[in-house]
Image (cartoon, rainbow, N blue to C red):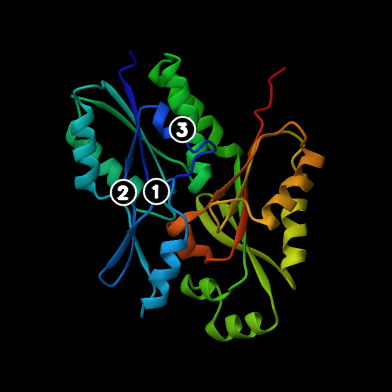
Amino acid sequence: MSRVRIVTDSTTRFSTPSFIEHYLVTIAPTIVRCGSVRIQDGPQVDLAMMHRLLEDCQTNPTTEAPTQAQLAQIYAQLQSSADQILSIHTSAGLSDAVANAHAASQQFLGRLDIQVIDSKSASIGLGLLVQAAAEAASRGEEFDTLVHIVRGMIPRLYMIFFLSDLYYLVRYGLISRSQAILGNMLGIVSFLTMEEGRMIPMEKVRSRSRAIDKLIEFVCEFSDVEHLAILQANSRPSQESVSIMDRLRVYHPSTPITTVSYGPFISTIVGLDSLGVVVLEAERSTP
């Protein structure tokens, strides 16, 4: 049996909901908090609780990454069944999970080989990396091979969202409050993309239907795609997501397409009514 274990954090989403039941993956908790109320994110958690949280919340919700102590405890618990741990986490540009994992791993120097990887992604982008690592471990691949697989996938991951509420851009200092108020009045929809592990603003369009067209255009820029994921607010595919999926299949008929809820953590960045896509570009074969 493999002596390699995979650790990640609970902002992750998987392309197959039952994945976690079949692979040796340990998930460290990420919390969304408002005052004394807290929600623990997780692969099966949708935004229903976030709606209730925001109804009673008088301030902006905050997020709490797995702490150094929590990660050290997980590593210690796995030590009896593992010689090597691959700890893959939400982008360091969005969360302290990577920094806390690095700090926790220092406690095990000389006793346990722990490799910490910054996914430079989140949600199902992170999940695709975790799945690839866990599947490779189950095949008996060497630890160095797992690290190589994950690091090789990171530059091929792309994420883009559109936001129907510009207030979330104010929270991150990307626009002023007055710009958000005016933009919301005019129905402006703004795009964010993941670049070098950080969400950065892209262009703006004048309607949600045009924003959906731009999502399709973004995906169509890729000629060869290994996996596509639609990130939505709902846990079940919405009519909007199904329509997007049908349009994407015209361009990428053989590519697996997944729909997932992006969950509480991502909602603090993009809001409760956003849509996004994650593209895992196919690996280019070397001549």
Mark positioned earlier in the residue sequence (3 or 1): 3
Disc 2, SS: loop
Q: Is residue 64 left or right of residue 173?
A: left
Residue type beneath disc 2: Pro
Label 2, label 1: how far apart the Cα atoms are? 8 Å
Residue 250 shown left or right of residue 271 in the figure: right
Residue 227 appears at what percent x and percent y? 64, 36
Relative horizontal placement of residue 93, taking residue 181 as reference (left or right): left
The correct choice, above or below, for 239 with respect to 72 in the image is: below
Comes first in the chain, label 2 or label 3:
3
Q: Measure the C-alpha gap from mark 3 to mark 1.
A: 13 Å
Q: Which of 73 and 68 is in front in this view?
A: 73
Classify 10 Å Cα crowding around label 3: few (below 14), some (14-19), many (20 and above).
Answer: some
Which residue carries the number 3 mark?
A: 19
Question: Where, by quadrant of the figure, is residue 215 drawn?
Answer: bottom right
**Residue appearing at x 66%, y 34% in the figure:** 256
Residue on which disc 2 sits: 29
Picture coordinates of residue 31 (x, y %)?
Answer: 33, 57
- Label 1 is placed on what type of residue? Gly
User: Which residue occupies the foreground of this view, 30 or 282?
Assistant: 30
Do labels 3 and 1 touch, CB within 8 Å?
no
**Mark 1 highlights which residue?**
42
Crowd class of label 2 (few under 14; some 14 to 19; many from 20; radius 10 Å)? many
Q: How far apart are marks 2 and 3 (CA)?
A: 18 Å
Label pair 2/3, CB-CB below 8 angstroms: no
Identify which amino acid the numbered label 3 is placed on: Phe
Mark 2 vs 1, N-terminal side: 2
Q: Which residue is drawn at 23% across and 37% down?
A: 74
Q: Do the residues labelled 2 and 1 touch (CB within 8 Å)?
A: yes
128 or 173, which is in the foreground?
A: 128
Tell me the quarter of the image containing the C terminus: top right
